[in-house]
Image (spheres, rainbow, N blue to C red):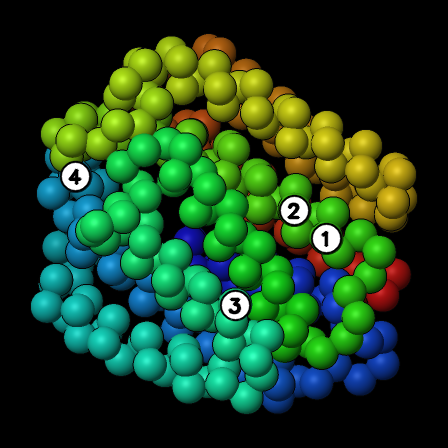
């Protein structure tokens, strides 16, 4: 699910910079493969570094559930990282985006930075990885970004950093506390993290709607999808139920998929 949404960001970035005539298919496919290698490497590194916390949280991620061994994951990281760099070396802009993703993946998960340990640094890292994703897609397409490109790239990256990063912590409190993390949910409590998520979600959705009206009206349809999903997440945060701590994060993921499909449809219909 995570890898698919990373590729969705790349694809939307490519469509947002599509020249409008012939899409350079080989270049985009190579860029997408490079991006997949980078995101898979970063995700596996995070899984290795988070193994104790994930097991404490009862996570179903491949490493925590035992589907994938830590040794196999390390081998995969060793192969995927150079592959990502080699596949992107033909384009400086793409190379910088891929390199940025690999660096941020390391900075987020591993010492000495371990940005995951604090909510503010986790949010910042996740937001920048989003910008790298859309930028990588645009570089691979090789065209000039359309008027609303930076609008949806900025909004959906903020969606990751201001909504997803906090929503994810709601279901990870026991493991985060055991791992010594200083997230908002651990330091200030679950109620504070829910409040921040409940406020940030509709704020980001509303910002997209206002920005679309002002700069790129066709994107308003996608903005309304995001805003509806944001209201759903806000409601879930304000009405918690026992055993459903992960519900806001699941809603965040569903909303991401739906909004990217809507943005892609708009870009294809009005290139």
Q: Locate residue 135, reporting x and y percent.
A: 62, 64
Quote the CA–CA distance across marks 1 and 4: 35 Å
Residue under numbered circle 4: 53
Q: Are marks 4 and 2 in contact (CB under 8 Å)?
A: no
Q: Earlier in the sequence, mark 1 or mark 3?
A: 3
Across and down, in percent, residue 111 comes to 20, 51
Return the residue at label 1: 150
* Residue 175 x, y percent position in the rendering: 18, 32
- Where residue 229 sits, quadrant-wise, is top right
Drawn side of residue 144 relative to residue 167, left or right: right
Residue at disc 2, secondary structure? helix
Please state which of residues 200 and 243 is positioned toward the viewer in this rendering: 200
Question: Sequence-wise, which precedes: disc 4 or disc 2?
Answer: 4
Residue at left 51%, top 42%? 160
Quarter of the image for residue 70 reads bottom left
- In the rendered view, tell whether residue 213 sits above or below residue 67: above
Residue 67 circle label: none
- Separation of disc 3 and disc 2 at Cα? 15 Å
> Quick one: 260 or 82, which is closer to the camera?
82
Residue receiving disc 2 = 154
């Amino acid at each position: 699910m995570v890898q698919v949404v990373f590729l969705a960001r790349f694809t939307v970035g490519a469509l947002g910079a599509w020249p409008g005539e012939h899409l350079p298919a080989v270049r985009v496919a190579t860029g997408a493969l490079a991006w997949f290698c980078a995101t898979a490497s970063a995700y596996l590194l995070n899984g290795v570094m988070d193994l104790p916390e994930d097991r404490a949280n009862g996570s179903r991620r491949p490493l925590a559930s035992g589907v994938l061994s830590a040794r196999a994951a390390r081998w995969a990281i060793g192969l995927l990282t150079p592959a990502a760099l080699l596949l992107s070396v033909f384009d400086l802009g793409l190379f910088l985006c891929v390199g940025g993703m690999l660096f941020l993946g390391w900075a987020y998960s591993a010492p000495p930075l371990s940005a995951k340990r604090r909510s503010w640094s986790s949010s910042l890292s996740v937001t920048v990885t989003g910008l790298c994703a859309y930028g990588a897609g645009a570089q691979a397409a090789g065209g000039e970004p359309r008027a609303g490109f930076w609008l949806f790239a900025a909004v959906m990256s903020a969606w990751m950093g201001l909504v997803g990063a906090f929503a994810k912590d709601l279901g990870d409190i026991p493991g985060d506390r055991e791992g010594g993390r200083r997230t908002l949910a651990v330091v200030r409590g679950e109620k504070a993290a829910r409040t921040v998520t409940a406020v940030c979600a509709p704020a980001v959705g509303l910002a997209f709607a206002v920005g679309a009206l002002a700069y790129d009206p066709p994107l308003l349809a996608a903005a309304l999808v995001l805003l509806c999903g944001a209201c759903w997440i806000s409601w879930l945060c304000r009405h918690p139920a026992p055993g459903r701590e992960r519900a806001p994060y699941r809603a965040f993921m569903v909303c991401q998929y739906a909004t990217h499909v809507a943005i892609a449809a708009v870009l294809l219909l009005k290139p």
